[in-house]
Amino acid sequence: MPQPCSLRVRLCHGLLLLGLPFAAAQGADSCRPLQELERPVVGLALGGGGARGYAHIGALQALEELRVPVDLVAGTSMGSIIGGLTATGMSPAEIKGVVEKIDWDDVFDDETDRKDQPARRKRVDAIGLYGPKLGVGRDNKLLPSGFVGGQKILLLMENLTSQRVHVDRFEQLPIPFKAVTTDIVTGEMVLMTRGSLSDAMRASMSVPGAFDPVLSDDRLLVDGGLVRNLPVDVVRAMGADKVIAVDVGTPLRDAPNITNVLNVLEQMTSLAIVQNTREQIEALLPGDVLLRPALGNEVNSASFDRFDVAIPLGYAATMAQAEQLAPLALSEADYRAYRAAVQGCVSGPPRVDFVRLNNRSRFDDAVLKNYISIQPGEQLDIAQLEDDLRRIYGLGFLRVARYEVVEDGPEIGLEITVEQDDRGADFIETGLTLSGDSRGTSINLQAGYLKTDLDGRGSEFRTAVQVGNDLGLLADVYKYLDDGQRWSLNPVISASRRDVIVYDQNGRSLATAEVSDYGIGFFLGWNIGRYANISLGAETFRGDTKVVVGPERLKEPFRGGEWQASLLLDRLDDLFLPRSGSLLRLEYSISDDALGADTEFSQFRSQLFTSKTLGRHNVLAFGRYNTTTDKRAPLYALFTGGGFLNMSGFEPNELVGQHYGMVGLGYRYQVLDSGYLPGYLGGSIEYGRAADRRGDLFDDGILNGSVYFAYDTPLGPLYLGWGWNEERSGLIFLRLGALLGSTNIGRR
């Protein structure tokens, strides 16, 4: 057995504090030892196990209470995250406070948060292409969205580490650290000992099949659990005299619980992990301590919401071995000195001497630099930098937009890396909308082709088609005019055909109007930050209205031409099931014979929607006000209402008039909590009507509303409910698709 060696307890000069001039640290590789104590070097081996790794925090809390120092750390998977944070000098209480606030469902979802998307993408939402997007590769193969690329994970890890310490080699950390990974090509164990600490932590937890591998030194690295789930030999090789090993691995399934092919595949992976864990446990020496929290079936590898269960179990398992750990404990004075040494190596974010852009995307450097706020000479503001990177990532079709604090000679700076989506620049877009009630069903399928690399500013070309009850065709070019993506030109070609059913006051169908049109438009756009867009332009079109009344079929052609102005303010977090934010649409159009219109009139349209959530409770407020402001609009331009949250007690488009207005309040309660697929019970109360005279809108409005169940499916939210109004019996409705987006491709 190795004899206890002389431990160089690290009491920092603080020479590497990132806020100090580098000259003060010249020649210092790490925190300088000021004194030595004769005691064993204690190494901590933190095993992998996904969310079961929360138990590591409880173990650290107990070790702190027992005054057992941690001098070296090696970690695998979740153990690398907890171990890496420990190595930066974070206390168990600080780590616990961090993980309790992490929304892991969000972290594991690389989809751009809607609030971070540019205004252009929010306006495009009106097209209705909400479904999966398939990349078109160079050989014209369709490429689905890949594994989790790690955009949010990397930002999270960088946030937790970069504002505490900055070192090039992990042995220079307040507590020396190694992360265990697997070379997915060779199957070899690879220890990450230098470079980006966040990359090391991210690589060690890259479960094959769920996360993209991490490329480091030309090696593709994945979760280290495949080769060393409990890195006992790793931490011993780092210099540990005594090893404390924390095993949180998932136990093997017994025979009755292996019932399908997925169970078999999971068991095959677990067999390799359990075997290499067993070998490491057998390598423990007398005086080493093995901790095995009794996690059982209470916490599985995906139970990221069970930290309140796992942490106490880790604490209990450690305290149960207090007697075995006692020989490693320090006196109160020595433990205070140990913690002071660790904390003395911790510093805040650095002052940035340079900002370097590593651009591997389709965007020009000038475009990306417009989104980067920090300038050389400024203190690193991590919150602002992360917001900048979220905005860059929100431009769309990027694999990652991240940062790293780096050294270049005597200077400390930022390297910002932006990588293109692996699927390329061309995409197939899809969409599906469905609505139905006791009187019929409407289904529309949408598909589009998007080309995103017209130039380095992010200009794009899109064509889309819709088939089903309503037909539509669209082709448009969105051309940015400046590197800041503020100004744009948008020529559009469109065609559509839709049916409008005319009802009597009792809800009986009297006639069907089939409205067809085709036209071209040209618009100038101004994007104001992420949330606002102003559009000015003109559109000219032709079409006809066919009215079917019994055996009679009347056809009336029309020609239209409009000047259009619109404002979009959009801060909603989601178009499917909005939980927070608001949306405001304002549009004004003037039908002008100078543009070919055969009828002159003007119209104003507005829509307001706002949502607020507290816990499981969600409150909605919404309204529309549409009015013909001058003269009378022809049949094809009449306003319509009806349908879910648009006078829910009526059929879609049942209310028709020169003017239309409604207001409503809604409430939803989350009754199902299944991570990505929550379910809600909700209801609404609404008031409004359509009218031929503006003054009649709210003088004699109709009270109506709905009760419904909503379930967020992979294809979008599914609503099943009952709509009622005060004038007649209600109707049962079914709807699949975005709550606030359009269900039609065609004219704006």
Image (cartoon, helix red, strand yellow):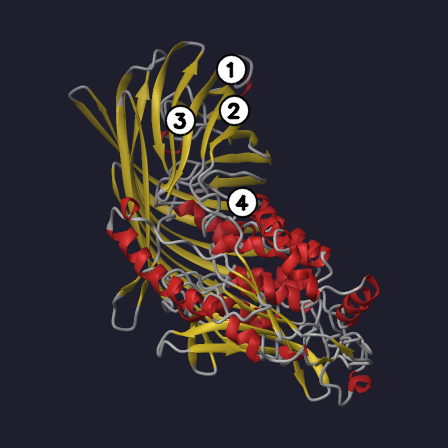
Residue at the spot 62% in from the left edge and 52% down from the top edge: 58
Of the two numbered discs 1 and 4 on the same chain, state the one appearing first in sequence: 4
Mark 3 surroundings: few (<14), some (14-19) or many (≥20) residues within 10 A: many
**Which residue type carries mark 3?**
Gly
Looking at the image, residue 119 lies above or below residue 582: below
Q: Please state, as top left, top right, bottom left or bottom right, where the C terminus lies in the image.
A: top left
563 or 39, which lies in front?
A: 39
Measure the C-alpha gap from mark 1 to mark 4: 50 Å
Mark 1 surroundings: few (<14), some (14-19) or many (≥20) residues within 10 A: some
Decide if residue 271 is on the left or right side of residue 739.
left
Circle 1 sits on which residue?
A: 701
**Which residue type carries mark 1?**
Gly
Element under disc 3: loop
Of the two numbered discs 1 and 3 on the same chain, state the one appearing first in sequence: 3
**Which residue type carries mark 4?**
Arg
Q: Nearer the viewer, mark 1 or mark 4?
A: 4
Mark yes or no: residue 174 visible: yes
Circle 4 sits on which residue?
A: 306
454 or 262, which lies in front?
A: 262
Mark 2 surroundings: few (<14), some (14-19) or many (≥20) residues within 10 A: many
Residue at the spot 52% in from the left edge and 16% down from the top edge: 696
Looking at the image, residue 343 lies above or below residue 624: below
Residue 445 screen position, x and y as percent: 28, 44
